[in-house]
Image: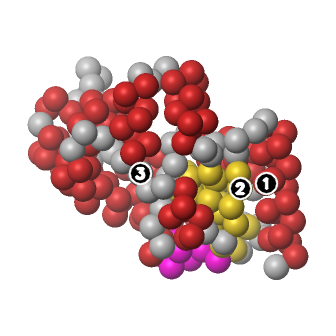
Amino acid sequence: MGVVIVSGGIGAGKSTVGAYLEKRGYLVVDADDAARETAEPGGPVWTAVVDAFGTAALAGDGTLDRAFLAGVVFRDASARRRLEAITHPAILQRLREQLAAAAGPWAFAAVPLYRPELRELLGASVVWAVVADPAVALQRLVTSRAMSEDDARRRLEAQVGNDVREAWADVVIANDGSISELRAAVDRALAELVDA
């Protein structure tokens, strides 16, 4: 089985690509889902986050308050590094377990915060980068996710740029147009996998 990492910044359309791949019958494991699964209340990640950020990091139901944490880490790079040091090892382990259990010729790992070392750590043979013009991504975040423009800008600026994502990727999937154009680009990328 081959593994493809699907990378992309916030608002680029990585989740839309993942949903389309699932519709096509492929296994897609998602780092955001793994983050939620590994931060169950009372578990080691949950405890470490509460120790690092205090009880303000908890929602009313005792789960981690992702909106609160995002507000902190997208304003403070040292807080972001602290949170990532706590969460990333557990997320990586969860993704590896899910991929190890996969069947079929290809499985996909949706990873928003891709770094080149993840290719080896996840056993990936191909990396796709889903990219959108920053103005398009900003508009999507404001309209689709109801973020304020300032919050959306902070989140976009906290991530690596498209030029870096494209340099790290084997395949670039541009997503500045329609859903049908995006699906056609994914179909072309899938055809390349079959031919590889």
Q: Is mark 1 in CB contact (under 8 Å) with mark 2?
A: yes
Label 1 – label 2 distance at C-alpha: 7 Å
Q: Mark 2 — residue?
A: 173
Please say if 147 is above or below 134: above
Q: Residue at x 21, y 33 (%)?
A: 57
Q: Amino acid at mark 3?
A: Gln
Magenta highlight on residue 120: yes
Q: Quadrant of the C terminus?
A: bottom right
Sequence-earlier tag: 2 or 3 = 3
Q: As rendered, which of 153 and 67 lies closer to the eye?
A: 153
State the image coordinates of residue 19 (x, y, percent, origin top left): 70, 43
Q: Which residues are magenta?
A: 119-125
- SS for callout 3: loop
State the image coordinates of residue 111 (x, y, percent, origin top left): 52, 56
Comparing marks 1 and 3, which lies closer to the viewer?
3
State the image coordinates of residue 26 (x, y, percent, origin top left): 75, 56
- SS for callout 1: helix
Q: Residue at x 51, y 24 (%)?
A: 142
Q: Mark 3 — residue?
A: 159
Q: Mark 1 — residue?
A: 186
Please say if 60 is above or below 27: above
Q: Amino acid at mark 2?
A: Ile
Sequence-earlier tag: 1 or 3 = 3
Q: Amino acid at mark 1?
A: Val
